[in-house]
Image: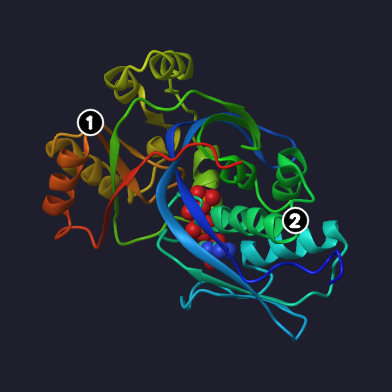
């Protein structure tokens, strides 16, 4: 067996993320924005299987008509990037994804898939790359891929790729609901650029609350500047937050650019009761818990 023959098939979980906070601190000259975000990996995940494909192509299968299976899929891009780095271009692979993370929800579903592919292929090839090199490969695929690779709790800055690990969140459970529409990230950034933001998250206060294990203090300070963008759909986002808070959530927030919204609960029992209450109203309604570092 050649050194470059990967041990396939390989399976990996692609965990979603939630934003405990999201701030946009500057618009940069290169068209990107400077962000400051506290991110948390959660147990809701896609399941990835990578198998050999004798045809020599890298393709993705999701079973979802609105998710492309070619190079537009971040998982395919991650695999091609990995094959180039490891010097095994031309190797065919079929990436099957059982998608559980909603698409266009602000939960980094595509980036999580890309990260899972990088972790899985690194394993299949006998760990040729360390965490740093894998993150560098991920960054070229997307800004959230580095966080999805490392997982856990982190402060993300720059485009989202500069990461500082944080202590784990205080014990809690999440209930995630998604109204029946998706929000395009570029569209929301354009709308954000058209307004002057007057409120920003108290990131320092949030970091202190997390460091002190103060769940109430964390929930009081959770904030996402995208909720202040003038967009009709934010009415439904506010309604979803209201529904979660009415069920006893300690705090509720839109994650990323939406449209998923989550509530924070002290324990599994109250989270499960909320899911039971809201599942008739929201087709997508799940409980989840925090997941620690992955690399
Ligand atoms: P983010 O939180 O990073 O803004 P999101 O959760 O809002 O991401 P995604 O679910 O990652 O958004 O998908 C957004 C777009 O990316 C969709 O239009 C989809 O077609 C495309 N896409 C590319 N690769 C994937 C993938 N593996 N899974 C889902 N969507 C993908």
Residue 266: which disc?
1
Q: In whole angstroms, how far apart are the C-alphas of marks 2 and 1?
A: 40 Å
Q: Tell me what residue is drawn at x 75 percent, y 49 percent.
A: 137
Please name whichever residue, 184 or 268, is drawn nearer the observer in this view of the structure: 268
| Image spot of residue 158 (x, y percent) | 66, 32
Residue 126: which disc?
2
Please name whichever residue, 195 or 239, is drawn nearer the observer in this view of the structure: 239
Q: How is the image coloured?
A: rainbow
Of all residues, the one furthest to the front in this rendering is 1
Dot 2: few (<14), some (14–19), or many (≥20) neighbours within 10 Å? few
Of all residues, the one furthest to the bottom in this rendering is 55
* SS class, disc 1: loop
Residue 115: which disc?
none
In the picture provided, is 151 more to the left or to the right than 56? left
Snapshot quadrant of residue 173:
top left
Query: Where the N terminus falls, by quadrant?
Result: bottom right
| Image spot of residue 72 (x, y percent) | 65, 68
Query: Where the C terminus falls, by quadrant?
Result: top right
In the picture provided, is 255 more to the left or to the right than 117? left
| Image spot of residue 182 (x, y percent) | 40, 59
Mark 2 or 1, nearer chain start: 2
Q: Tell me what residue is drawn at x 57 percent, y 27 percent.
A: 165
Dot 1: few (<14), some (14–19), or many (≥20) neighbours within 10 Å? some
* SS class, disc 2: loop
């Amino acid at each position: 067996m050649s050194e470059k023959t990967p041990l396939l098939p390989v399976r990996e979980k692609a965990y979603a993320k939630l934003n405990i906070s999201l701030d946009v601190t500057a618009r940069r000259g290169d068209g990107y924005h400077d962000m400051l975000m506290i991110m948390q990996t959660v147990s809701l995940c896609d399941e990835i299987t990578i198998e050999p494909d004798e045809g020599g192509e890298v393709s993705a299968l999701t079973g979802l008509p609105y998710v492309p299976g070619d190079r537009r899929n971040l998982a395919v891009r991650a695999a091609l990037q990995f094959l180039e780095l490891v010097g095994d271009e031309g190797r065919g692979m079929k990436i099957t994804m059982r998608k559980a993370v909603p698409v266009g929800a602000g939960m980094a579903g595509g980036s999580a898939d890309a990260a899972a592919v990088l972790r899985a292929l690194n394993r299949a090839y006998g760990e040729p790359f360390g965490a740093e090199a894998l993150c560098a490969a991920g960054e070229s695929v997307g800004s959230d891929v580095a966080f999805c690779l490392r997982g856990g709790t982190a402060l993300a800055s720059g485009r989202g790729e500069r990461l500082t690990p944080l202590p784990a969140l205080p014990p809690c459970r999440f209930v995630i609901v998604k109204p029946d529409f998706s929000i395009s990230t570029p569209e929301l950034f354009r709308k954000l650029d058209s307004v002057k933001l007057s409120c920003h998250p108290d990131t320092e206060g949030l970091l202190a609350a997390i460091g002190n294990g103060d769940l109430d203090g964390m929930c009081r300070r959770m904030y996402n500047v995208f909720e202040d963008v003038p967009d009709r759909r934010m009415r439904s986002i506010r309604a979803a937050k209201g529904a979660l808070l009415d069920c006893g959530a300690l705090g509720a927030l839109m994650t990323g650019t939406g449209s998923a919204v989550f509530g924070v609960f002290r324990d599994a029992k109250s989270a499960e009761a909320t899911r039971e209450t809201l599942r008739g109203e929201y087709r997508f309604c799940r409980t989840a818990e925090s997941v620690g570092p992955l690399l």
